[in-house]
Amino acid sequence: MAYSVPRATSLPALLLRAAAYFVFWVVLAGTGLKDLAVGAITALIAAWMSLRLIPADDMVLRPGRALALFLRFLWQSLVAGVTVARIALSPVMALRPGMVSYRTGLQPGNRRFLFMTYASLLPGTLPTGTDDGDLITVHALDTAQPVTEQLAAEEHRLSAAIGEGLAP
């Protein structure tokens, strides 16, 4: 089931994003009266700006797949933390850092930027830029690992979560 957010010019889209930003604000700042007042104003401004930058009908969110992607990300972060601790405490660092080129199936624009942002949060990868084609340059902590295959799998999962079909 896909959940499509209303058009950017509609009030429901603005209120939906403002509510999400406001919940995030409350989690960070608390429920004090002054905090709530500032949070409500800030949430409305953030929602308005986000609709200007990424229109509401630009992507379709699939909540189940997005939740699965988020849970996978949390698990990978935990595993990466343990791995980094193991490597840091090891007398021999078993890493082979370097640059890897990854060909994406996502069209240039918001979807590709979203993938690059997501990939930068994954353990051991940091996208550093793109060329004029479909190549993304990625700094990898260990080039002996199947970095491009892992990125392809994550791109597929992200694409499924936002309802994007990959380009051939």
Image: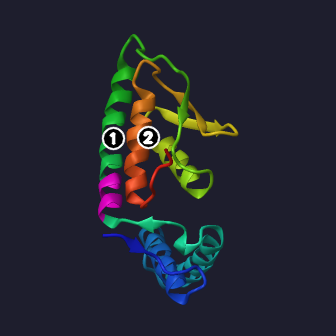
Does the magenta run of residues contain 29? no
Q: Which residue is mark 1?
A: 76
Which amino acid, by three-letter code, is at mark 1? Answer: Gln
Q: Residues within 10 Å of mark 1 (few under 14, many from 20)?
A: some
Picture disc at residue 122: 2
Query: Considering the numbered disc 2 on the image, is that residue within a helix, a strand or a loop?
Result: loop
**In the picture, residue 127 is in which quadrant?**
top right
User: Which element type, helix, strand or loop, lies under badge 1?
Assistant: helix
Query: As shown in the figure, which amino acid type bears the numbered disc 2?
Result: Leu
Q: Position of residue 10 (x, y in %)?
A: 56, 87
Would you place residue 145 above or below residue 111 in this image? above
Residue at mark 2 to residue at mark 1: CA–CA distance: 7 Å
- The crowd level at tag 2 (other Cα within 10 Å; few <14, some 14-19, many 20+) is some
Looking at the magenta stretch, what is its main secondary structure? helix
User: What percent of the width, then of the height, locates residue 37?
Assistant: 54, 85
- Is residue 67 part of the magenta span, yes or no? yes
- Residues in magenta, as a range: 64-70
CB of mark 2 within 8 Å of CB of mark 1?
yes
- Which mark is drawn over residue 44? none
